[in-house]
Image (cartoon, grey):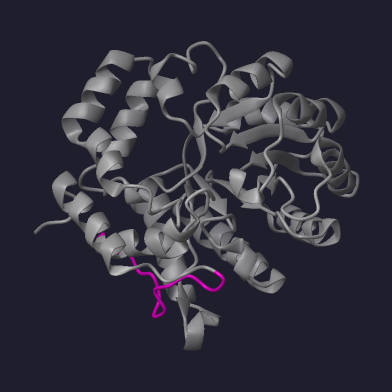
Amino acid sequence: MATAREARSWARSALRGIGDSLYTPFCGADGDDIDWDAYRALVRYCVGDLRHPMLWCTSGLAEFWSLTLDERKRLLEVAIEEGRVANPDVVVQACTAAMSAKDCLDLTLHAQQVGADIAYIQTPMMELHGGEGALRFFRYVADRTDIALGMFNSPSSGYVLSPAESARIYDEVPAVCATKEGAFRPAASRLLHELAPDLVLWECDKTVYRAGWLRDGIVCPAQLGTAGYLFETPQRRLLSEYWDLIVNDQLVEAMDYARESGLDQFDIDLGSWFTCYPGRSDYFTHWGGAFKYAASLLGLPIGGYPYSRPPQAELPPEAKAQIEKAYRRLGLVKA
């Protein structure tokens, strides 16, 4: 774990490779319980079988907004327990976003105490007074903790920090060392890099990596939180092979590989089910039911209650059919 003082030097060397954002497998009536055996198996699969070097815990894909604080703490503890057995050096990233600064502080202190490497705070989702309010939120947590902090700039918050607002947080809160830019705004990410060149930045728009942004030092060699385990298997390490080409600056080879392996087509075939509910098409979401259905096609355990907790909707049959067709075309699921 990096202390606040060590955060920035630590992040530049430690944040590398594919970081898996873990779903939460539910069970019991209405999904009121968590299937801990399934969750442990998921962690072992990501860290042990796929050999991915990072985990991203209790964030949007995990449906953190539907979990109690105790559930979120236990999910992180289990990820650390199982992950470090499979790989003692696995980097564990904890998302500690919460509706109140006090709850966020509670989760961040817990992450620090149980050995997470870094805590990410998503832009506050309720009653946010822009960048000034976000800065106060970060400062409140940082003043009371001693762990590396990251920003998670997601449109699911309802407000996306501007490059200047993010750079100000970085300038004024020394523990902040990294950011996951999830709003698909490459031009804004480039400006943020200019304003805060030492900030470790992951841009969710994958095209910038093909454009040489890693070579230019704009983005980092780490996928801070993705569903990488849904894009390959231990037998066909499609994403890992593609990412290795990107990191080694073999950009033409990476583009050829993505086209010839089917990864590019897979993105098209999946459609937008992972991040868009059709009844609210202008809103970016992490549709837990879609991620878990994809996982089930790969044989991963998703618990006895395969849906998201409310207020998310159940995944419709047409989504399942499209996702399954995409996996069959890619060849990760046999007909």
Q: Which sits in the foreground, 295 or 6?
A: 295
Examine the rendering and report whether any part of residue 160 can be seen: yes
Q: Please name the residue shown 42% across and 57% down the image.
A: 278
Judged by its main secondary structure, the magenta piece is: loop
Q: Position of residue 293 (x, y in %)?
A: 33, 64
Q: Position of residue 212 (x, y in %)?
A: 44, 14
In the displayed structure, does residue 106 sit left or right of residue 219?
right
Q: Please name the residue shown 15% across and 47% down the image.
A: 329
Is residue 83 positioned above or below 14 on the image? below
Q: Please name the residue shown 63% across and 27% down the image.
A: 200
Q: Which residues are magenta?
A: 298-311
Q: Quadrant of the C terminus?
A: bottom left
Examine the rendering and report whether any part of residue 299 can be seen: no
Q: Position of residue 17 (x, y in %)?
A: 46, 34
Q: Quadrant of the N terminus?
A: top right
Quadrant housing residue 169: top right
Quadrant housing residue 263: top left
In the displayed structure, does residue 288 sit left or right of residue 260?
right
In the image, residue 308 lies in the stretch drawn in magenta: yes
In the image, residue 274 lies in the stretch drawn in magenta: no
